Image (cartoon, helix red, strand yellow):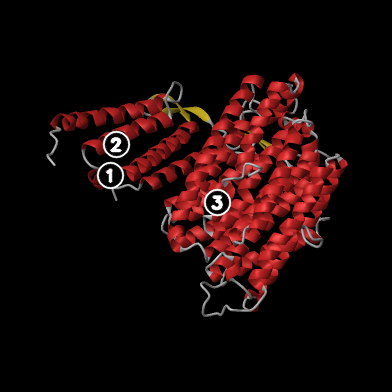
Amino acid sequence: MKKLNDVILRTVTKTAVVIILTFSINLFISGHHRPGGGFIGGLAFVTAILLLFLVYDIEMVRKNIPIDFKVFAGIGVLISVFTGVGGMIAGKPFLSQAFGRVALPMFGETEMATSVLFDVGVALAVIGTSLTIIMSIGDDR
Amino acid sequence: MNNYVVLPIIIPLITGMVMVVFKNNIWLHRILSLLAIALIGVDAVFLLEQIKTSGMQTLYLGGWVAPFGITLVADMFAALLVLVAAIVVFCCLCYAFSSIGSERERNYFYPLCLFLMAGVNGSFLTGDIFNLFVCFEVLLVASYVLVSLGGTKIQLRESFKYILVNMISSFLFLIAIAYLYAITGTLNLAHLSVRVAEAGQGGVITAVAILFLIVFSLKAGLFLFFWLPGAYSAPPTAIAAIFASLLTKVGIYAIIRLFSLVFYHEPGVTHLFIGILAAVSMVLGAMGAVAYWDVKRIITYNVVVGVGFILAGFASFSLVGIRGSVYYLLHDMIIKALLFLLGGTIIHLTGTGKLRDMSGLIRLYPQLGWMFFIAALSLSGIPPFSGFTGKIFVTTGTFQSGYFWLGGIGLLTSLLVLYSVMKIFMSVFWGYTSFTTESEKGTTKGLLPSMTFLASLTIALGLGAEGIHAYVDLAVAGLLDPHIYIDAVLGGNGR
């Protein structure tokens, strides 16, 4: 089979992936007060990796990102559940969240919330699950 | 507020996820799964005592009070089911250790069982109808994988049908929830109960109730059981036993919960309909059980009869009938697991499920034979065993409510059930022993303890029915009087 000429695709991807990853992190952080959050942020993250799958092949990506995404998803769920358990340890109902203002050295006074940790877990779970699904469907083996 | 209520859901979730992370250590999987199930059992016992001394226990997740947040409610009925489910799954897992095979163990068998358990417990404990849908999905997704895990031809064929049927019923479930939300504007079960009582259960709400009934009938195998015999005979024994003992019961639980708490105003329509469906499924299930000469088929059709019988008691909607339903439901969870394990062991030993190809097993396996005898008697409700209490209360309840046909069909099908399991007993265990230790396909090594435990449990539950009477009566009281539930959840809010 003749090899496709995909110079443009490859060049665009190299920049686009960085932009998409940055955007996904932006989506994730803005989710605290505005639309966004762990779920969408995670999905946007997956689209970047998906682009890499399309342009390079799965083997290449797997070699460069040697992570078992099932484990990734498991750790994500554990983080989320344990933020809920944290509320239980403090004597509040399961899933109670806490927040407060903390003075950080560089950012000044910042609002910190445990629900961000919950969202980190959600993001990891979404990334892990969707990549597992994509890789097991897309794989020839 | 009581955080013990959420533990039966998050313990299996956390341990399951830890197992996913440490994928390759099978011994860790075994120990952790048993530990998790045991912890759930201990927690359920705690809950039972708390409910007995201080009423229903509730938990508002994240501190968001009902009806706005997600509420978990542990009433006596739910807590009893959580406890029995934990016991049954514990035994099935012990059975699985020496029967499931390392291939399935390495492919997340134990985590999947725990996720299934999380979904089942979530369905029992939730106080919110949308959350009930979510928990149903959790347990269904786990069960899809468990049905097809291993990928044999029959498993793939049956799991396809199983997934299709459940997809459609989940779809209908969501539609029914949307209708109900459009009519009442709430999803919290207690709040729904208040609003439906205020607005009166008119024609539209009754129609939605029937839609819910269809959904749960599909899940429970009440009349709409066409998918059940195939799906429950495809997976390996331990998985089939967990399915038979838990999955249909979750559907039954949902029917009982909804039609005692929310849609209880028109028993002449809805409960009569449940009664008719129950009668039909008892008759059809018994016909299937009598007709087949295959161990697995006979046992799976008995699941259908059990579902019909439990809901026959509920359909009578009287104190005695519902008491019978609760007793029989607890009994049925144990006996169905035992029966499936026994049937699976017979097939495992002889390598065939055909009754006509087996005979005289009792010489080689006396313990197995006598346990099967006990299970057969208990299943059909012969006095010293646990089936009797439920059967007598259900029959009395249906007679008291004037549903003589329903009670009569229940008694008649009990005879047919007895015939169908005795058929297995006589042709497998009696007769000339053509079978020698050389020709056996497997051993009973490691399989007997869990079955012995379940068999002794059915004897204990039969002899000690008086002992759990206080708990069962509290459960029945909670089901008959929705105000107890409403007060526990809303406590003055939202009225």
Answer whether labels 1 and 3 touch (C-beta < 8 Å). Answer: no
**Marks 3, 2 in one chain:** no
Mark 3 belongs to which subunit?
Answer: B
Q: Which mark, by number, is residue A49? A: 2
Element at label 1: loop
Dot placed on the residue nearer the N-terminal end, 1 or 2 = 2
Task: Tell me the quadrant of the picture where the C terminus of chain B can be found.
Answer: top right
Q: Secondary structure at mark 3?
A: helix
- Give the percent coordinates (x, y) of residue B224: 62, 41
> Label 3 amino acid?
Gly
Residues at discs 1 and 2 in contact (Cβ within 8 Å): yes
Q: Which residue is located at x 53 percent, y 57 percent?
A: B32
Residue carrying label 3: B230
Quadrant holding the N terminus of chain B: top right
Q: Nearer the viewer, mark 1 or mark 2?
A: 2
Point 41% across, 58% down: residue: B24
